[in-house]
């Protein structure tokens, strides 16, 4: 990690009205690599992603340091953030059905997103969009350009979202459960496309997921979160050697194809997991 | 664990009491709905203690002292027959409250059940009930009430019936729309799988879900009801003359309005503050009964 | 324990036929899986079998009796269902006690309190949770309540519509363990819809692969690790799941 794109130290987020912070003391830095953030619902993993994009209006964000390249995310004004968000840093959400505007053609939406950040004529934008749709392996981009969101399948929709997010050539992409709404058969395709583009463009990727298999296969490093804290950080290839009982519990609870059919090991939660992380 | 759980029944009551307390607490926190609640409390107390609060007999004519300005023994002055306006207003609150009460207990259930049945069964039921609703909705409510009162004969009771007949359709519409969103919910399917009859599902599962929005709508409607009642009274189709109904008071005061402002001003202010109070309270209830708020309890 | 037979089940929504001649048999006490993409009609099969959806042709029988011929009360005590979304399957304004006592009242069953307490113990919840409302429960606890609701009428067949897909892995493990235990203890016959082959492999003896309203192949669980399917779509589905789990 020579030049970190993102450097976060001691990030805490507390939602307005909540007594306990949703995220506490999270630190990590990200180079041009793929980082997975894993945890169960309520572990604060999505909150971290949204805090980085400063999408949490109703929450109190504190940190010792939140640096994205030359931008200080903690103190950046909303105007500055508008230039960063979508242009240099973008987010892919879980369900394309909710992230695409239902009354606008898919292609036009992508083109419009592009033109808000990059000065280009309509024709240029269109050419660029078609090229990008090609890159996400949409077979007939000219036709798909004209389709409305309800006319495309989930996998196609998510590929369109990826195209939209990568079109401005961002340095950081945050993917929040990008494939959990998709069928198994298209999940891998979409992930492979995302993976290839992230590699080709040298983008830093934060993949937020509940699925250990997914981060194992598509990330370099993994952060495991529990109750708003990072309990363990380790290389994805070392996931099987995770030390923390929570990480081990999560791995064991997943039924496996061809596994024994005995009762699955059940996670016994421990209050001591609320303590700061074990580095391995 | 062999616990006798016969204590579960009585424990449910406090739950709803807690809910009611939470709702009132929520309403009091916002100044506007607190104002609504306050005016309503004053109205109810006035109605209950009318004989104690009134300074004069509201029907007692004093032809020696007609059209006295406010002050001098008559807080709000006297009307053309020398009756004390303040006392008439105080007794008038009983009539307003009665109209509101009777209209709500007629309109709420009718609207709720028509809407729930039409939404739950769909098909023919829906078509027939909704077309009937449409017919009622296609007339301005005051005109329709006028027609009903004209047909039934002018009296306070007929005015209440007429207002009720015109006030249920919007509630039925609302209840139907709500029902449609719950009809395909899994908990309705689960109830059907348990062998619950349609009546049971509507009563136990759908009605409780529609109730908050119907209550809100009903509260907001009260302002309209009061205005319609006052309108009918004003047109001489509601309460009969000696009755101290606010609208009727304005109607008779109208003739003397130019020189004797107090005849219409005080009943007008009473109507204004009560209908405003219901509107504010309805707005407050909308926030208080919001499902997102419910979850925080 | 009752066997299930489904024969030539066809269903249309208006002009669109969503199920085409679906046929399969489930042995008594078996757990049978239905897998396929979203929109392949696997949940619709369950809704037809339970007669939540009535406009179908064909034949569904449980224990040799056609479901259409069963009186309503018998059918309810024969087949119950557990739904996918634990947040949508419990009435938000009904306490757990209400959820569990309703079916008992409908069927006029005696010893209501005892049965409710037993159902709570069966699904591993403390009995004093009866006073709680759904918003006071976690997702896993809600799903346990939904299971308790299904088993309180002592059915023979339980239809599971993606019972764990909305839950976290660790909670999924608890619920799957619970479902397995209940099957052994109570002799349930399960039909389980899932999109997750590892769950199907863990729970089911056999499973059917569905694609656009048709069953393309019925396979034993042993066919998953080796991908022994013959139908191209079934091969693709199993292959993708295997690749997803093993991909490096």
Image (cartoon, rainbow, N blue to C red):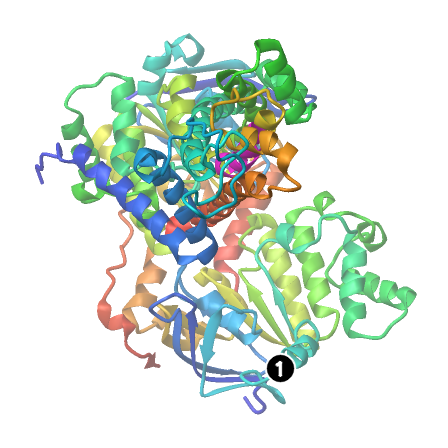
Most foreground residue, C170 or C206? C170
Q: Quadrant of residue C124?
A: top left
Q: Is residue C172 magenta?
A: no
Q: Main secondary structure of the magenta part?
A: helix
Q: Is residue A82 left or right of residue B209?
A: right
Residue A192 point in image, percent of width and height: 63, 62
| Residue at the spot 22% in from the left edge and 43% down from the top edge | C129
Q: Quadrant of residue B28?
A: bottom left
Most foreground residue, C232 or B194? B194
**Which element is circle 1 on?**
loop
Residue B55 point in image, percent of width and height: 36, 38
| Residue at the spot 29% in from the left edge and 26% down from the top edge | C102
Most foreground residue, C157 or B3? B3
Above or below: residue B90 compared with residue B236: below
Residue A50 point in image, percent of width and height: 53, 69
Residue A175 point in image, percent of width and height: 57, 66
Locate the N terminus of chain C by quadrant: top left
| Residue at the spot 30% in from the left edge and 32% down from the top edge | C99
Above or below: residue C63 compared with residue C225: above
Q: Is residue A260 visible?
A: no
Q: Is residue B115 left or right of residue B53?
A: right
What is the chain identity of the residue bearing mark 1? A
Residue where numbered disc 1 is placed: A77
Above or below: residue B120 compared with residue B89: above
| Residue at the spot 63% in from the left edge and 77% down from the top edge | A78
Residues in magenta, as a range: B217-230
Most foreground residue, A246 or C2? A246
């Amino acid at each position: 990690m020579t030049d970190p794109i993102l450097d976060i130290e001691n990030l805490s987020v507390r939602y307005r009205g909540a007594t306990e912070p949703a995220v506490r003391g999270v630190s990590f830095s990200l180079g041009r690599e793929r980082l997975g953030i894993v945890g169960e619902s309520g572990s604060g993993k999505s909150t971290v992603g949204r805090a980085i994009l400063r999408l949490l209006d109703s929450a109190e964000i504190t940190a010792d340091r939140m640096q994205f390249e030359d931008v200080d995310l903690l103190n950046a004004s909303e105007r500055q953030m508008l230039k960063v968000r979508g242009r240099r840093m973008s987010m892919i959400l879980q369900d394309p059905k909710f992230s695409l505007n239902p009354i606008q053609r898919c292609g036009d939406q992508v083109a419009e997103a592009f033109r808000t950040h990059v000065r280009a004529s309509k024709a240029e934008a269109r050419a660029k969009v078609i090229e990008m749709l090609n890159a996400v392996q949409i077979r007939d981009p000219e036709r798909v350009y004209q389709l409305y969101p309800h006319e495309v399948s989930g996998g196609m929709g998510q590929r369109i979202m990826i195209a939209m997010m990568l079109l401005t050539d961002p340095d950081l992409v945050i993917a929040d459960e990008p494939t959990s709404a998709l069928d198994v058969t298209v999940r891998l395709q979409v992930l492979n496309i995302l993976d290839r583009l992230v590699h080709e463009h040298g983008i830093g990727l934060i993949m937020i997921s509940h699925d250990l298999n997914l981060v194992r296969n598509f990330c370099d490093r993994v952060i495991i979160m529990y109750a708003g804290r990072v309990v363990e950080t380790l290389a994805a290839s070392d996931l099987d050697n995770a030390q923390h009982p929570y990480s081990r519990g999560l791995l064991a609870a997943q039924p496996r194809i061809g596994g024994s059919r005995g009762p699955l090991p059940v996670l016994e939660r421990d209050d001591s997991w609320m303590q700061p992380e074990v580095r391995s | 664990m062999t616990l006798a759980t016969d204590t579960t029944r009585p424990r449910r009551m406090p739950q709803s009491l807690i809910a009611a307390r939470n709702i009132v607490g929520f309403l009091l926190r916002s100044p506007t709905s607190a104002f609504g609640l306050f005016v309503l409390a004053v109205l109810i107390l006035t109605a209950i203690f009318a004989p104690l609060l009134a300074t004069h007999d509201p029907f007692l004519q004093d032809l020696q002292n007609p059209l006295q300005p406010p002050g001098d023994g008559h807080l709000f002055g006297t009307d053309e027959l020398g009756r004390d306006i303040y006392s008439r207003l105080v007794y008038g609150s009983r009539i307003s409250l009665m109209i509101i009460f009777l209209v709500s207990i007629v309109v709420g259930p009718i609207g709720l059940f028509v809407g729930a049945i039409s939404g739950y069964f769909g098909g023919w039921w829906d078509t027939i009930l909704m077309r009937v609703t449409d017919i009622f909705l296609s007339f301005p409510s005051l005109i329709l009430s006028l027609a009903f009162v004209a047909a039934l004969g002018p009296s306070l009771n007929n005015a209440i019936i007429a207002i009720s007949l015109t006030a249920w359709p919007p509630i039925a519409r609302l209840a139907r729309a709500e029902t449609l969103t719950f009809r395909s919910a899994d908990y309705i399917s689960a109830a059907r799988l348990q062998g619950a009859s349609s009546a049971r599902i509507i009563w136990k599962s759908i009605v409780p879900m529609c109730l908050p929005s119907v209550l809100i709508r009903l509260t907001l409607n009260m302002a309209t009801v009061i205005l319609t009642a006052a309108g009918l009274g004003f047109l001489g189709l509601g309460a009969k003359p000696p009755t101290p109904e606010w609208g009727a008071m304005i109607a008779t005061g109208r003739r003397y309005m130019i020189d004797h402002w107090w005849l219409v001003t005080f009943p007008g202010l009473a109507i204004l503050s009560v209908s405003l109070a219901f509107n504010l309270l309805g707005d407050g209830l909308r926030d208080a009964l919001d499902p997102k708020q419910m979850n925080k309890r | 324990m009752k066997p299930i037979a489904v024969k030539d089940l066809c269903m249309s929504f208006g002009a669109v036929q969503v199920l085409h001649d679906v046929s399969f048999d489930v042995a008594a006490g078996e757990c049978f899986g239905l897998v396929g993409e979203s929109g392949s009609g696997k949940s619709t099969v369950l809704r037809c079998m339970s007669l939540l959806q009535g406009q179908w042709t064909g034949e569904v029988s449980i224990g040799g009796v056609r479901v259409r011929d069963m009186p309503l009360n018998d059918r309810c005590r024969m087949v119950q269902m557990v739904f996918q979304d634990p947040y949508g399957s419990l009435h938000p304004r009904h306490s757990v006690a209400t959820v569990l006592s309703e079916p008992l009242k409908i069927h006029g069953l005696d010893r209501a309190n005892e049965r409710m307490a037993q159902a709570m113990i069966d699904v591993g919840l403390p009995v004093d949770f009866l006073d709680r409302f759904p918003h006071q429960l976690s997702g896993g606890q809600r799903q346990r309540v939904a299971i308790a609701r299904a088993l309180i009428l002592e059915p023979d067949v339980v239809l599971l519509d993606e019972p764990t897909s909305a839950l976290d892995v660790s909670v999924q493990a608890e619920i799957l363990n619970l479902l397995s235990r209940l099957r052994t203890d109570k002799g349930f016959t399960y039909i389980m819809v899932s999109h997750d082959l590892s769950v199907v492999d863990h729970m089911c003896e056999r499973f059917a692969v569905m694609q656009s309203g048709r069953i393309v192949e019925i396979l034993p669980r042993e066919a998953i690790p080796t991908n022994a399917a013959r139908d191209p779509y079934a091969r693709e589905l199993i292959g993708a799941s295997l690749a997803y789990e093993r991909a490096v």
